Image (cartoon, rainbow, N blue to C red):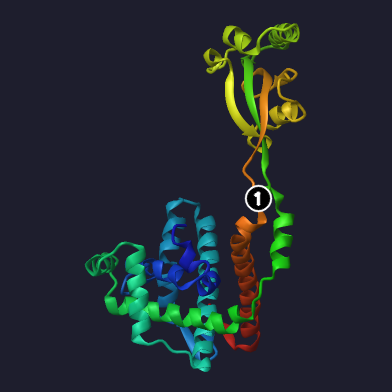
Amino acid sequence: MKNKVYSFTVRKKFFSGIFLGLLATFVSLSAGIAISAEVVDRIVAIVNDDIIRLVELDKAAFSFEEQVRSKKYFADKENEEIYKIRMEILNNLIDEKLADQEIRNSGIFVDEREIDNAIEQVKAMNYYSDEDLRRALTASGVSMEEYREEIKHQILRNKLVNIKIKSKIIVTDTDIKSYYDNHPEKYASKQKYQLRNILMTYPVTMDTQSKQAVYSRMEGVLRQLGEGATFQEMAQEISEAMNASDGGSLGLFSLDELNVNIAEAIKDLNPGDVSLITDTDQGYQIFLVEKKEETGGQALSEVTEEISQLLYEESVNEKFQSWVEHLREDAHIKIIR
């Protein structure tokens, strides 16, 4: 879902920085444009002293429902998917109401200069002139007044999260080091293998006897290599792969980039070693490890800031979820079906 950032991850929208919300604003304000004005309105949820109306839910859910309908499910499946989407969005709207109530109770406010500055930054990020922005808003059926109001809400919610959650989070050097040590797959260097291959294919429908004949030919190739034949010349002469004319050159690969069978066949080989005959999706193959080298890898000092931000956002997410659940426990919430 293209606009999932705004409507399906409300919690992330609160804490992931003001600009994520601003950049999603076009979607959120224009999502219900095609909804008929004749839809009968009613209350779908009560959140303390606030209400959520059917038209609000319809507007937020419209584009997602259209995407479900475009998949052409059977009626029961379509209704089930739409129901799940509407309930998820309704719960997000409830969380928004709770947050807005906290904003009022906390006395948080936004002045016009903050809204102006936010719009200027959005324009700069998108290389928009004032005219470009107004044209984009018009195309989405959104007035500048509506846009400014939505930005105001985004800034207010961002301030709320700063006060209630972000100010209480500390990421220590020990946290960063622990994460780095526990994720070698992300930051450690990888050993890569420079490979050549010789391939002999066989049809999937080939009978066992004929397949064995192909395997026997490959055994002959393996013997010749063991007796001193040059792998590159043998590949040019015998291999049925497209890279035969290049002496079977494949390139540089880490084990996790290779088929499991191939990785198993070469993982313990040293430069200059030749693999055993390996059965692959393409056919029988023999591999030469020309060289091995260490590539990539990042020192802790290079990724400290990245890890710190990642841990910070994870902590914000966790604490925000807990905070919202606490608000729900203390709130009077009634969903009217």
Question: Can you identify the residue that label 1 sits on?
Answer: 186
- What residue is rendered at 72% in x and 6% in y? 224
Farthest residue, direction right: 268
Q: Residue furthest left?
A: 131
Query: Is residue 296 rendered to the left or right of residue 275?
Result: left
Q: Is residue 132 visible?
A: yes
Query: Foreground residue, 154 or 191?
Result: 191
Quadrant position of residue 182: bottom right
Q: Position of residue 7 (x, y in %)?
A: 47, 68
Q: Is residue 318 above or below residue 229?
A: below
Residue occupying the point 37% across, 87% down: 111
- Residue in the picture at 71% in, 28% down: 261
Residue 110, given in percent of the width and then of the height, sits at 41, 86
Which residue is nearer to you in this view: 195 or 297? Answer: 297
Q: Residues within 10 Å of mark 1 (few under 14, many from 20)?
A: few
Q: Judging from the image, what secondary structure is the residue with disc 1 in?
A: helix
Image coordinates of residue 271 in percent, x first then y, are 71, 24
158 left or right of 333?
Answer: left
Residue type, mark 1 in image: Lys
Is 111 placed above or below 218 here? below
Left or right, 134 with respect to 111, comes to left
Which image quadrant is residue 267 in?
top right
Question: Hey, which quadrant is residue 77 in on the image?
Answer: bottom right
